Image (spheres, rainbow, N blue to C red):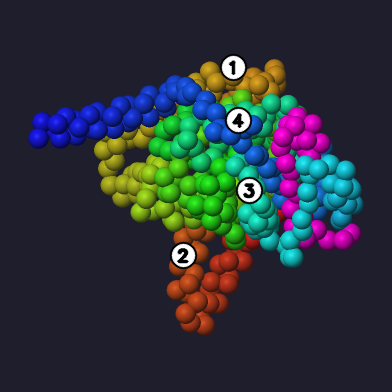
Amino acid sequence: MRETLKNETKSKATQLLAYVKDALNVFYPLRRVFSHSQDERGPRVVALIGTYKTKKETISLVNQLLSHNKEIEVLIVDDSTPKEDMSYMNKIKLMAKTKKRLNTIRTPQNNLKAGAQNFGLEHLKKQKERPDVVVTMDDDAVIFEDTISELIKALYANERLGAVCSSVMVENKDHNLLTRLQALEYHGFNIARAMDEGFFKGPLVMHGMLSAYRMDALNEVEGFQENHLIEDYDITARLKQKGWIVGFAPKALASTDVPPSLSILWKQRVRWYLGGLFVVKDNIRKPINVIQDFFGHFTLISSYLLIALSYLLGRYTQINDTLVTFLIVLALLNFVVPTIFGIITLYYYRQRDIIDVLIRLLIIPEFVYANILSLVLLGSYFYFVFLGVNRYLQRNKIGSTIAQHIDRVFHSMGFSQTWGTR
C-alpha cells in the first residue's frame, strides 16, 4: 500500500515537474541534450521538394543541398508541369544523370503541394532502404551550409519529436515597405516558435517552407492531407494528436520570398486564416493540439464582442464607468505591451537595419499593416461561417441562389477556397 502510494506520488510529482517545465519554457526555452541516432553513420535523410513550373531558384536549392550535405539525398517531384514550362525541370533531370544523390519523379496529374509530397512519400516507401528523416521545403527556399544539419540535430534532440521547423528569414525584404513589414512579422513568428518550444506539444505550425519530419511520424499520420488550404498546420495538429511533440530549430536558417503586393498578400492570408479556422474546427474536441490558435481566436472574438456590446449599451443605455475603464485599459495593454516587446526583440533580428528600426519606432506602418491583416481575418471569420451554413442553403432553389450571390460577393472581396498551394 505504502509502495503504491509512493509510486503514485512520484508519478504526480513527475507530471507536475513536466507542467512546470512547460510553463517556464514560455519565457525561456529549455535546453535539451542531443541524442545521436542508433545508426553510427547517422540517419538517412531525404529532401523532398514538390515543384510546379520549376524556377531557376530550384536549381540553386538543389545545388545548395548537395554541396552543403554530403549524405543527403534529394527527390524532386514534378507536379505535372506543362511542357512549355519544363525548361528548368529538364535541367534538373540532366543534373540527376550525373548526381547519384539526386532523383526526379513526375505526378500523373497536378495534385498541388500536399499531393505532390504524398506522391514522393509513396515513392520513398517503396525503396529497399527507407529514409529515417524527410525534409520538406518550398522549391524556391534559400538555405545555408549548416541549415539541414541543424534541423537534424534539433530533431534528434528528443525521441518524442516528430518534426522540427527552421527559422525563417525574408529573401526579398528590401523590395518595398510591404516586404519589410512582413520580414518584421516573420521575425515575430520566429520569436513565438522559440517561446513555444516544449510548451503544449510545441510550436503551432511546422511551416511548409522548411521542416524536417521523422519518417515514422509521417507514416503514423498517413502523410499530408490533400485538398486542404493549409496542410502544414493540419499535419502539425495531427502529429500532436498521435502523441508526438514538435520543435523549432533556431540555428537552422532559411529564407524565402514574401508577397511583394497587397493583392498577393491578401490571397495568401485568406488561405492561412481560413485554412487555420478549418484546422481549429477539426480539433475543437481536442483543443490542446491548437491551443495557441484557440486562445488567439477566443481572445480576438471576445474583444470584438465587447466592442459591439459597449456600442449597443452606449446607444440604448447608460454605460457603466467600470466597463468603459476596462475597455480602455484593455485597448492600451493590447497596444503598449506588443509595442514594447517588439522593440526589445528587434535586438535579435538578424536582418535588422536602420530602416527597420525606424519602421518599428514610428509604430504607424506596423499599426496600419496589422489592421489590414485584422480586416482579412475578420472577413475570413464571416466567410467561414457562410461556408458552414451554405450546405443548408443548398437544400432548396431559393437558398442555393442566395448562396451563389453571397459567394460572389465574398469572392469579389478576395475570399475563396481556391487559393491552393502549388
Closer to viewer: mark 4 or mark 1: 4
SS class of the residue under badge 4?
loop
In-front residue for pair 245/374 = 245
* Residue topped by disc 1: 347
Marking on residue 40: 4
Q: Magenta residues?
A: 61-84
Task: Using the numbered discs, state the Cα–Cα distance from disc 4 to disc 2 in whole angstroms.
Answer: 52 Å
Q: Residue at x 44, y 56 (%)?
A: 282
Task: Using the numbered discs, state the Cα–Cα distance from disc 1 to disc 3 in whole angstroms.
Answer: 43 Å
Q: Which quarter shows the N terminus? A: top left
Task: Using the numbered discs, state the Cα–Cα distance from disc 3 to disc 4 in whole angstroms.
Answer: 17 Å
The answer to whether residue 98 is above or below residue 345 is: below
Labelled pair 3, 2 in contact (Cβ < 8 Å) = no
* Residue topped by disc 2: 388
Q: Residue at x 55, y 36 (%)?
A: 164
Q: Residue at x 78, y 49 (%)?
A: 103
Labelled pair 3, 4 in contact (Cβ < 8 Å) = no
Q: Is residue 232 visible?
A: yes
SS class of the residue under badge 1?
helix
Residue that lies at the very extreme toward the bottom in this rendered image? 397
> Which of the two discs, 1 and 2, labels the residue nearer the N terminus?
1
Residue 317 relative to residue 311: left or right: left
